[in-house]
Image (cartoon, rainbow, N blue to C red):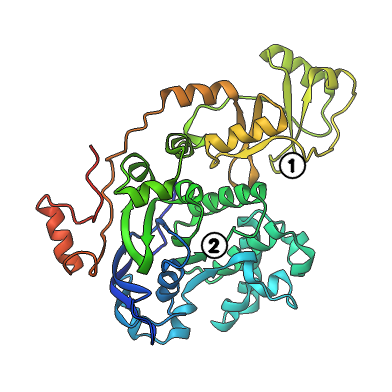
């Protein structure tokens, strides 16, 4: 789950008995869905193909018009608003970023601010700010075209474009589904880093339950017709799946999935001896020996790790140069312990370098730390936070959100069919 560090800039969302019925279809694509999405949270929509996840997502910004029900964002019923005006207030990210190929990175990001009449100086400053936020150097990337970017870079630009006008809500439809697993992990970590800074309300569709566990503050598990089977925290869903459908959807290895609930920033990192290009190697070697450590981490001018140097390597050089080692095992402090362990195993290393926001060096994590964290992990569901309201009028007797919340106040569970954690 993401860790808030600043003011929440997202808006609450309420889908109040929302239905989508297509002509000629017997069953609705979405049937009487009520879903409460707290401001500043990440809510993951998961379920089998064709269950109504994307339809639900697109009804929030009315790319698909609901047949019935209300959609309320920050207290305002947006079903009564002009659709184009609404969409300019909501960020939207799809697979591969959806960038316009004939426009530069800067022009892609500037689309909505231009529509809103921002002046050129403000737009230019916002483009550079967002490129920094998604860890792309503005001087290098602002004038490039999408074809000159990797898939991961395109996706980062897509996120920057969605955030350009500082919308309170960000909708993401399988945003990382078209990239390789390593890039996917890095993009997930980057999204969590961004969310820690901007605190938007993010609703994301995914087929990957592991991704939902890693990113989601809350997970909504849908069955056919967007029937909400369970809506709760990742911890409680893993510990107490509502029924056989949810248990089967989670799949085997639910115990191992608990490892994705602990992040690198939740364990104690190992301090490291650091060096900078231009330093005498002998001075760095002396610090290493004094600290009783084997590896020094070389940092660039922005405190980002460039490479690691062993005592033997240092003894063979005079001055630290600015060489960058792209194969160095690096994980974000938003990475899960599972991610960190995978990174170390792939690199055949007992340690990995940990970075924070803007890729700034944080410390080291080692296998021993991860093993100790696993041994101490408590797999019981957390009862610290109360789940938001989620239900279907077609699955249970139709009740309003106000009545559901009143039921909670009376000690009854409005969260259907989630059981209270034991």
Does 73 sit left or right of 268 as displayed? Answer: left
Q: Position of residue 93 (x, y in %)?
A: 55, 67
Viewer-proximal residue among 202 and 179: 179
Viewer-proximal residue among 403 and 309: 403
- Quick one: SS at disc 1? loop
Residue at the image position 51 percent from the left and 70 percent from the top? 91
Q: Is residue 312 above or below residue 135?
A: above
Q: Position of residue 184 (x, y in %)?
A: 62, 51
Residue at the image position 40 percent from the left and 73 percent from the top? 60
Please give the residue where the numbered disc 2 appears in the rendered image. Answer: 174
Asked if residue 144 shows in the view, the reply is no
Please give the residue where the numbered disc 1 appears in the rendered image. Answer: 301
- Packing grade of label 2 (10 A; few <14, some 14-19, many >=20) is some
Residue at the image position 43 percent from the left and 47 percent from the top? 250
Quarter of the image holding residue 342? top right
Q: Position of residue 137 (x, y in %)?
A: 72, 56
């Amino acid at each position: 789950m993401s860790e808030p560090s600043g003011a929440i800039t997202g808006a609450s969302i309420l889908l109040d008995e929302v239905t989508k019925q297509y002509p000629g279809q017997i069953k609705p694509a979405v049937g009487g869905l009520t879903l409460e999405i707290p401001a500043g949270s990440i809510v993951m929509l998961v379920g089998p193909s064709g269950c109504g996840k994307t339809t639900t997502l697109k009804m929030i910004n009315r790319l698909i018009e609901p047949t019935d029900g209300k959609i309320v964002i920050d207290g305002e019923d947006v079903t009564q608003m002009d659709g184009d005006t609404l969409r300019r207030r909501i960020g939207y990210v799809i697979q591969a970023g959806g960038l316009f190929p004939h426009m530069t990175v800067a022009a892609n990001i500037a689309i909505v601010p231009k529509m809103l009449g921002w002046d050129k100086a403000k737009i230019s400053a916002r483009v550079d700010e967002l490129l920094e936020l998604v860890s792309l150097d503005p001087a290098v990337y602002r004038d490039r075209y999408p074809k000159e970017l990797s898939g991961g870079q395109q996706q980062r630009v897509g996120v920057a474009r969605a955030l350009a006008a500082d919308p309170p809500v960000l909708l993401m439809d399988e945003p990382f589904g078209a990239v390789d697993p390593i890039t996917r992990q890095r993009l997930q970590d980057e999204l969590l880093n961004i969310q820690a800074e901007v605190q938007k309300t993010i609703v994301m569709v995914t087929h990957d339950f592991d991704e939902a566990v890693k990113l989601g503050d809350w997970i909504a598990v849908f069955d056919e017709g967007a029937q909400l089977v369970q809506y709760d925290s990742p911890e409680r869903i893993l510990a107490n799946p509502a029924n056989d459908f949810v248990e089967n959807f989670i799949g085997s290895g639910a115990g191992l999935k608990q490892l994705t609930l602990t992040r690198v920033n939740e364990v104690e990192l190992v301090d490291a001896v650091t060096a900078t290009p231009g330093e005498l190697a002998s001075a760095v070697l002396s610090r290493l020996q004094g600290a009783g450590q084997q590896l020094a981490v070389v940092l660039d001018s922005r405190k980002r790790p460039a490479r690691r140097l062993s005592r033997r390597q240092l003894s063979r050089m005079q001055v630290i140069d600015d060489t960058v080692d792209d194969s160095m095992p690096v994980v974000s402090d938003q990475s899960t312990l599972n991610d960190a362990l995978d990174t170390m195993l792939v690199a055949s290393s007992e340690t990995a370098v940990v970075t924070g926001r803007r890729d700034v060096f944080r410390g080291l994590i080692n296998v021993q730390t991860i093993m100790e964290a696993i041994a101490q992990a408590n797999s019981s569901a957390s009862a610290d936070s109360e789940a938001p309201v989620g239900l279907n009028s077609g699955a249970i007797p139709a009740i309003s959100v106000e009545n559901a919340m009143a039921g909670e106040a009376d000690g009854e569970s409005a969260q259907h069919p989630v059981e209270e954690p034991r």
